[in-house]
Structure formats: structure tokens, C-alpha cells
Image (tube, grey):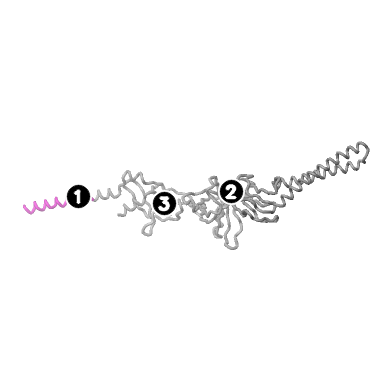
Amino acid sequence: MQKLVIAMVGGIVALSAASCRKQASQQEESKAFMLSDSMMRQIVLDTVRTETVRNELTLVGKVVPDENRVIRVFPLVGGNVEDVKVELGDHVRKGQELATIRSGEVADLERQMIEAQSDLLIAQKNLSSTEDLFESKLVPERDMITARQMVDKAQAELDRVKAISSIYGVSKSASYVVRAPIDGFIVDKNVNRGTQLRSDNAESLFTVGQISDVWVMANVNESDIPKIRLGMSADIKTISFPDEVFKGKVDKIYNVLDPETRAMKIRIQLSNASFRLKPEMHATVSLNFEENTRMQSIPSKAVIFDRSKNWVLVFTSQSNIEARPVDVFRNLSKRAYISEGLADGEMVVSHNQLLIYNALNQ
């Protein structure tokens, strides 16, 4: 009887211990897979959906001014540069003075102006006298016609000198003023105070460019040429603004290859109203294009690489989150395409997923 009582007590104790262990295990399991409400507010869920697979081509390029809005300023006369009013990178207005050149050619042009005005005045007085004499029958008509021709000739010479002066933009001094032809920025400067200029100088003094719209010139490797199309959208990143993406489109394909680099150039046009993009900046160009296949797609940041595999966290409920291995077909900067492991409509964690992943693997 005593042995039976002891056996019954032992069974009860064992059953109770087993029940406690099972309850503790259930509590631990529930605790391990249960997300708090505060944590739920910190994660982001995305739905798996089938999309056309996109590809991404990364190119290296640089920012250049729009050549259609760039004007090179050449000196129309030779001489000595007396003053330079602007520096490289300055913003100028149309008609603004850029430099002053002391020129013998301008001084000679002023002399020609004075002579032409004097000759015209003399010719007009001579014509007036000849007309009076002709009315008095003192000179033949031939003399009057000759006098009128001299007036016309003097007037034509004065008009010629005035036209040249207008082209040169000279005043009544021996100085030639170089002025900005358009609003823009000084993107190139090849003159300093004291520079001696020849009248046949072939180098521009300044280059003025409008950079409210700019180009990015990028090199395309020979193997990637078939992927390039006009109108392709392009994302541009620069070293100066690493967190900012500038949007543009391919608007020209240069269908020739550089014999040295074996690369083809393309041009991307960008709006630059804020003037943040500067000429000669290095740029990274990302071109996006579609392929003829469809696949499950999720945000690329939802993919976790661990233990030589790619994982995603599939969310069903706060207490049901699965770390599932997947096969990644392609991982771009924003989207990842999954060839196996997910189904349309499933939810994946795409923000703060590492915290949950580490908790699941403890």
C-alpha cells in the first residue's frame, strides 16, 4: 500500500513537471515569434508581385554644358588687354563688360570715322555750290551730277565705317570693350590683364554657357551597345551629391566608336535649374530597360544574405514570421527579382528586417 501511494505521488509529480515544461516551452516559442506593437510600427511590409524583369546598365560619364547654349567670345581686334572684369565661374548678363582692349585698330577706325564725316560734309557743301552755279547756267549739268556722286560716295563710306564700329561696339575712344553675348556663366577664360593680342588670334578669350540645362556624356562599352535606345530613362549620381538622384533621358546616340577606347558615346539631357550640376563633374549613369520575361519582384533591401544564401522574412502575422531561403535572379538598386521561393500576394519585411531575422536565429 505504501509503495502504491509513493508511485501515485511520483506520477503526479512527473505529470506536473511535464506540464510545466510544455507550458514554459509554449511561452518561450510564443515570445520568440511575437512582435510587439511598437516593433510593428517600425517595420515596412511589401507585397510580392509579378513584374516584367528590368535590367540596369551602369556607365561612367561627365557633366558638360549644352553646346547649343555655349558661345565662345573671340577678339575682333588686336591690342593690349587693359582690364578683365570677370573670373572663371562668374555669372554674367548679356551686354555685361568682360574685358577692355587698348587697340590701334580701334583708334584707326575712329580716325576713319572723323575723315568720313568730314568728306561727307565737304561733298555736301560742294554739291550745294554746284547746284547754285548750275541754276545760274555757270556750270554744265555734268559737274552737278559729279558733285552728287561724290556725296553718295562719301555717305557710303561713312555708313561703312559706322557699320564696322557697330559690329565692334566701339565708342569714341581707342578701347575695344568685350561684352557678354548671352546670360550665362564663364565656363572658360583664356585672357589676363596685360595680355598682348594679335588681330589674327584664333583662341577665344571667354566661353559663356547657360547651364540651366546640361548634358551628361557617357561611354558605352561595345558589348552593351545593343541595349541602348533613344529615350531611355537615366538616373545620374555625382560625388558632390551622393544621396541625390538626377533624372534624365538619352536624347542622342553617337553611332561611332572611339578608336582608342572602343566605346560609343551617348548624351543624356538634364534640367539644372538650381545650377547644382557643374561642367566637368564626374557622373555615374544608371540606365534602366525591360527584358522579355516576368518574375516575382520585391524591394532589393528586403533580401538578407547570410550563410551563403539569400533570405527574406515572409510575414503572415505578428506571431508567424518565416525566414525563407530564396533564389535571386537579379538584384538591382531598388528591385530584386526572385526565381524561386516566393508566391504572388505574400508579404515580406523590407525595413528593420535584420532585427527580426537575428531574433529568429537565436
Helix, strand or loop under label 3 = helix
Q: Earlier in the sequence, mark 2 or mark 1?
A: 1
Using the image as rendered, state which of residue 42 and residue 149 is in the foreground.
149
Instruction: Tell me residue 155's x, y (percent).
Output: 80, 43
Instruction: Tell me residue 95's x, y (percent).
Output: 64, 44
The local crowd at label 3, few if under 14, some if 14 to 19, many if 20 or more residues have their Cα within 10 Å, is some
Helix, strand or loop under label 2 = strand
Asked whether residue 13 is drawn in magenta, I would say: yes
Asked if residue 306 lies left or right of residue 82, the reply is: left
Q: Which SS does the magenta portion mostly show?
A: helix
* Residue at left offset 53%, top offset 45%: 274
Mark on residue 185? Answer: 2
Mark on residue 20? Answer: 1
Residue beneath disc 3: 301
* Residue at left offset 34%, top offset 45%: 40
Q: Farthest residue in the top direction?
A: 135
Asked if residue 242 lies left or right of residue 36, the reply is: right
The local crowd at label 2, few if under 14, some if 14 to 19, many if 20 or more residues have their Cα within 10 Å, is many
